[in-house]
Image (spheres, helix red, strand yellow):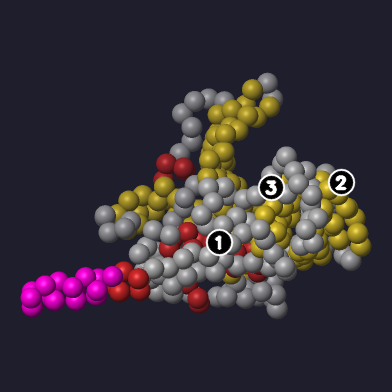
Amino acid sequence: MRKFLYIVVALALFVSCEKSLEFRLEEKGGNLVMFSFLTPDSSFNVHLSKSVSHMSVDDFERIYDGNITVYRNGKIIDDFIFPFDKTWACRDDVVISEGDTFRIEAYDSGGQNISAETLVPYAVPVSISDTATIEREQNGNGKTQMLQCKLKIPDREGVSDYYQLLAFEEICAVTTGDSVCQRTEIDYSKTDPVFYVRDQEGSLIGGLDFGGCFSDHLFDGENYELTVYLPVQYANAPESSGIYRKILFLLLSHTREYYDYYRSRTVAEYGYELPLLDPIRIYNNVEGGLGVVSAYSISADSLVFN
């Protein structure tokens, strides 16, 4: 009898524990989502959709009755119905220049209204100040030859600047006076102090790669010489005649909105596969909805190996 009572008590505890672990994931979706990344001398592009619940197999819900209004420096310059059969709407007549302030408003027939505003930043010129082939310790595996490139960035005084440095290899073939190039992005070594993780990202992600994004926190208003390292094979001239290799450095001048969005999104994606990590809220600057409206300008310099 006592044994039977033990079994009954154990079953009761099991059932009560099972009930205490029950939870429901609240279904959410249907919010307007807008993205736009503006670049001077490029076409105006904007994305409009609706968010879906976490249980959905779709990435987003299409908008069949959406409208976009574009303001530049306080004046309406475009107003159009968003094309339901496209992911992005392209408007070639919208001119984008450095220093412009853009505001984008969107609404649908359901009464949802969203808006966002951004300032197109001025490009900060980048120039290659020095290059050298050196031997360098690489991830504790002994010394290896690397191409060291020093880039000069004349940061603006009194302005908080946000950058992203990208590197590309271009292999170009010259035929009948024209060049046909194939471009590949280079994953360069980001050991310069400007790339170090700080502020809200925390100590658990010290090795996280933010795609070359950094701020002028360490050199505000100064001429900074940023050092990057590339595999030495990028410094070799192509073996075939009529072909040359170009190493292209692009310095993107971002808004604070894009900087926060990109870094928070990177942290969130990093945390998807971790069992325990505080929730990360991806940055959003769209009022009344979700998404990011931002802008960036580009400067460039290159090395050519014939």
Classify residue 118 as left or right of residue 179: right
Report the disc number at residue 93.
2
Q: Amino acid at mark 3?
A: Arg
One can see residue 118 in this view: no
Pointer 1: residues within 10 angstroms few (<14), some, or many (20+)?
Answer: few
Q: Give the quarter of the figure containing the C terminus.
A: top right
N-terminal-most mark, 2 or 3: 3
Q: Amino acid at mark 2?
A: Asp
The residue that appears at 46% across and 42% down in the rendered structure is 234
Mark 1 element type: loop
Q: Position of residue 20 (x, y in %)?
A: 35, 74
- The residue identified by callout 3 is 62
Q: Position of residue 272 (x, y in %)?
A: 43, 60
Q: Give the quarter of the figure containing the N terminus.
A: bottom left
The residue that appears at 66% across and 58% down in the rendered structure is 30
Residue 176 vertical placement versus 93 (above, below): above
Alpha carbon of mark 2 to alpha carbon of mark 1: how far? Answer: 40 Å
Q: Position of residue 226 (x, y in %)?
A: 53, 63
Q: Amino acid at mark 1?
A: Glu
Pointer 2: residues within 10 angstroms few (<14), some, or many (20+)?
Answer: few
